[in-house]
Image (cartoon, rainbow, N blue to C red):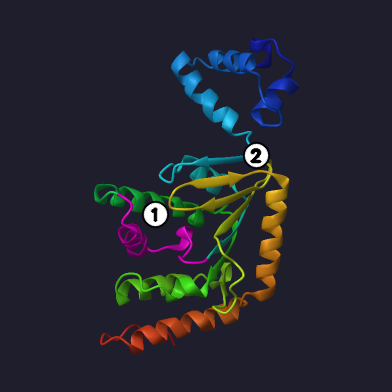
């Protein structure tokens, strides 16, 4: 590629690895040598320059950047307050979330549910990222869907306590969800999500704040065994309130 472009090989490497931002002329020359037409180049150019922004936001239904971050991350640490983390949601729970929001068009809900389930494929890979999910107890208390849906979700969490820690209900200092992605050959990225936008931050100050957040969570969250016991309490409580007996966890 360097010979074809008349560039130094180190320049090709730096651009491909994202170490430097290619100029507009360099970008056109590179993509043209790859056989891309002007329409492709125009579309790629917008995405490319956004990738160097320290902060950028996307529409909530744009999943491309999020899916890419999850797919190439070597480590994912997250805090969820009102909901269970998307990567460990069961399908019916995810569906109830979209239905309950009353924001998404009914005809789009199944598309979003399936996209969320497809994202979970990274959890089954041999080279899956190292994950740690902090789940606030408020998320466990949410009366979302039927008792059967909630029990199914509790059980999914219960069998994943090796990558999950529960934040007790009385810990109220944390106000918004947050995810920190770490990569092998790229800078860390902080991600926050609302119903209106997905926000990505590559700024060093934002990353440092996220690290402090997770250090604080490490100090106040329940450990693995305590988290497991807490989840068993929710499963047992749900079954005590239900006329339908469930599977004996013992």
Q: Is residue 32 left or right of residue 112?
A: right
The spot of residue 85 in percent (x, y) is 48, 62
- The stretch of residues the image draws in magenta is 81-104
The answer to whether any part of residue 5 appears in the image is yes
Which disc, if any, is residue 230? none
Question: Which residue is labeled 2 in the image?
Answer: 54
Q: Quadrant of the C terminus?
A: bottom left
Q: Nearer the viewer, residue 69 or 81?
A: 81
**Distance (Cα) linking label 1 and label 2:** 29 Å
Question: Which residue is labeled 1 in the image?
Answer: 117
Quarter-of-image position of residue 27: top right
| Mark 1 crowdedness (10 Å alpha carbons): few <14, some 14-19, many ≥20 | some
Q: Residue at x 35, y 50 (%)?
A: 112
In this picture, is 44 found above or below 148?
above
Quarter-of-image position of residue 217: bottom right
Q: Is residue 200 left or right of residue 154?
A: right
126 magenta-colored? no
Mark 1 touches mark 2? (CB < 8 Å) = no
Q: Is disc 2 placed on a helix, strand or loop?
A: loop
In this picture, is 63 found above or below 117?
above
């Amino acid at each position: 590629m360097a010979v074809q472009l008349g560039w130094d090989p180190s320049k090709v490497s730096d651009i491909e690895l994202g170490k430097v931002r290619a100029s507009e002329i360099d970008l056109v020359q590179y993509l043209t040598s790859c056989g891309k037409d002007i329409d492709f180049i125009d579309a790629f150019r917008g995405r490319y320059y956004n990738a160097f922004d320290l902060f950028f936001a996307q529409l909530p239904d744009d999943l491309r950047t999020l899916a890419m971050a999850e797919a190439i991350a070597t480590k994912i640490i997250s805090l969820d307050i009102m909901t269970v983390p998307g990567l460990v949601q069961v399908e019916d729970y995810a569906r109830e979330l979209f239905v309950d929001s009353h924001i998404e068009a009914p005809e789009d809900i199944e598309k979003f549910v399936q996209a969320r389930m497809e994202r979970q494929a990274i959890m089954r890979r041999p080279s899956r990222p190292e994950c740690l999910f902090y789940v606030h107890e408020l998320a466990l208390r949410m009366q979302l869907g039927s008792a059967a849906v909630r029990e199914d979700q509790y059980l999914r969490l219960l069998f994943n306590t090796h990558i999950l820690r529960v934040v007790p209900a009385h810990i109220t200092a944390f106000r918004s969800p947050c995810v920190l992605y770490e990569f092998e050959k790229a800078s860390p990225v902080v991600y926050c999500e609302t119903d209106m936008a997905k926000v990505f931050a590559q700024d060093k100050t934002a990353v440092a704040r996220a690290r402090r957040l997770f250090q604080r969570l490490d100090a106040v969250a329940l450990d693995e065994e305590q988290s497991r016991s807490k989840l068993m309490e929710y499963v047992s409580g749900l079954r005590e309130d239900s006329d339908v007996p469930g599977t004996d966890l013992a």
